[in-house]
């Protein structure tokens, strides 16, 4: 189909992935196989397939124009007004983007619904950074929060994510979005953690509702997200929250190293957690090679040296 709606948007400076050009694979209207309570788009009945699609070449022309206009773009992000893996020509699009992207990275943001589909999984293996959502670990929670289309089985999502992670060699980011009273119960958090340990992703991004949601649901606090991040011991976790609290704690060398050993911290985490003296101590540890630094899908994480 044809449309006069823009096929790309941005560039936007994303703190987690860099300067990004977005591609919208459903520019005319929402087409999604989930109806999440927290969706930033309008609430809508789910659909199992995408029926209104724009041709691949239209996207390639739009991306080429944007890359010429904005040479500073670092990452091309495949997204949609809905779920991008429902786009029927995704494989062809990814192949063509690969051939024109040069040194830019290709990123996709998916709700994970079709990850157990062999064709989709095969296509995602060609992408530099795959970001998959995992909000729940149980059928009840998926039904309540993500409200899956009847064509989707929650267990296939979990099994598909674990299977995908075993063969995917590029960067895998898992996003978990927490909604008050729905998926922030301790039992659900622990089950999500178990699945995350099986997946062992490059990075886990946790967050909560940030913009007006489709339904009447509430975010959780920054403090609660911090507690969850501590539960996810051993994983590279970033926390997204509009109202971060500056804790300004005074920690000595040993306390800082213990903290980094438990869970790698981002620059932002450390700036929120430590007071100025402790930040200086941290920088000394870094200079003396007691701290390691690793780039995990665009975010620097500091850990304790072995
Ligand atoms: S998967 Fe994304 S687009 Fe679809 S309903 Fe959920 S939040 Fe909205």
Image (tube, helix red, strand yellow):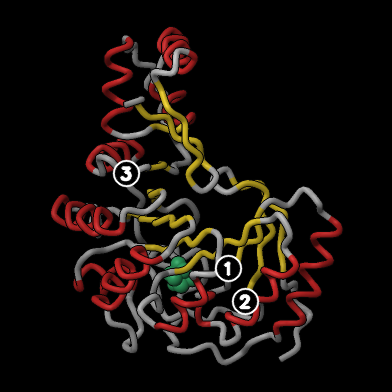
Query: Which quadrant of the frame does ligand 1 lie within?
Result: bottom left
Identify the disc placed on residue 79: 1
Choose the circle earlier in sequence order: 3 or 2. Answer: 2
Picture residue at 45% right of the left edge, 60% below the top: 169
Residue 25: mark in rendering: 2
Above or below 277: residue 93: below
- Residue 157 visible in rendering: yes
Quarter in which the C terminus is drawn: top left
Q: Are marks 2 and 1 in contact (CB under 8 Å)?
A: yes
Disc 3: CA contacts within 10 A as few (<14), some (14-19) or many (>=20): many
Q: Position of residue 133 (x, y in %)?
A: 39, 63
- The 10 Å Cα crowd at callout 1, few under 14, some 14 to 19, many 20 or more, is some
Q: Which is in the foreground here, disc 3 or disc 2?
A: 3
Q: Find the distance from the CA under tag 2 to the CA under tag 1.
A: 6 Å
Q: Earlier in the sequence, mark 2 or mark 1?
A: 2
Residue 74, relative to residue 273: is it above or below?
Answer: below
**265 vs 174: above or below:** above
Of the residues under marks 3 and 1, which one precedes in the sequence? 1
Quadrant for the N terminus, please. Answer: bottom right
């Amino acid at each position: 189909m044809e449309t006069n709606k823009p096929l790309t948007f941005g560039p936007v400076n994303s703190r987690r992935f860099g300067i990004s050009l977005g591609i919208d694979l459903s520019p005319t209207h929402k087409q999604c196989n989930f109806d999440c309570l927290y969706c930033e788009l309008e609430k809508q009945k789910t659909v199992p397939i995408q029926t209104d699609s724009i041709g691949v070449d239209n996207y390639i022309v739009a991306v080429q124009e944007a890359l010429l206009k904005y040479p500073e773009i670092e990452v091309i992000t495949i997204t949609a007004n809905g779920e991008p893996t429902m786009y029927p020509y995704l494989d062809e699009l990814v192949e063509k983007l690969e051939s024109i992207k040069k040194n830019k990275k290709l990123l996709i943001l998916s709700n994970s619904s079709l990850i157990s589909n062999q064709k989709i999984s095969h296509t995602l293996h060609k992408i530099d950074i795959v970001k998959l959502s995992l909000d729940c670990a149980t059928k009840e929670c998926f039904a309540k929060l993500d409200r899956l289309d009847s064509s989707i089985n929650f267990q296939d999502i979990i099994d598909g994510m674990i299977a995908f992670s075993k063969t995917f060699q590029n960067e895998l980011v898992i996003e978990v979005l927490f909604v008050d009273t729905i998926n922030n119960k301790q039992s659900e958090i622990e089950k999500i953690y178990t699945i995350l340990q099986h997946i062992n992703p490059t990075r886990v991004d946790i967050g909560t509702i940030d913009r007006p949601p489709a339904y009447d649901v509430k975010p959780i606090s920054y403090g609660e997200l911090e507690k969850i991040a501590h539960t996810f011991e051993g994983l590279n976790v970033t926390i997204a929250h509009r109202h971060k609290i500056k804790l300004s704690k005074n920690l000595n060398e040993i306390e800082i190293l213990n903290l980094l050993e438990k869970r790698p911290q981002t620059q932002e985490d450390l700036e929120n957690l430590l007071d100025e003296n402790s930040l200086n101590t941290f920088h000394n540890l870094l200079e003396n090679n007691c701290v390691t630094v690793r780039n995990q899908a665009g975010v620097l994480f500091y850990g304790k040296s072995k």
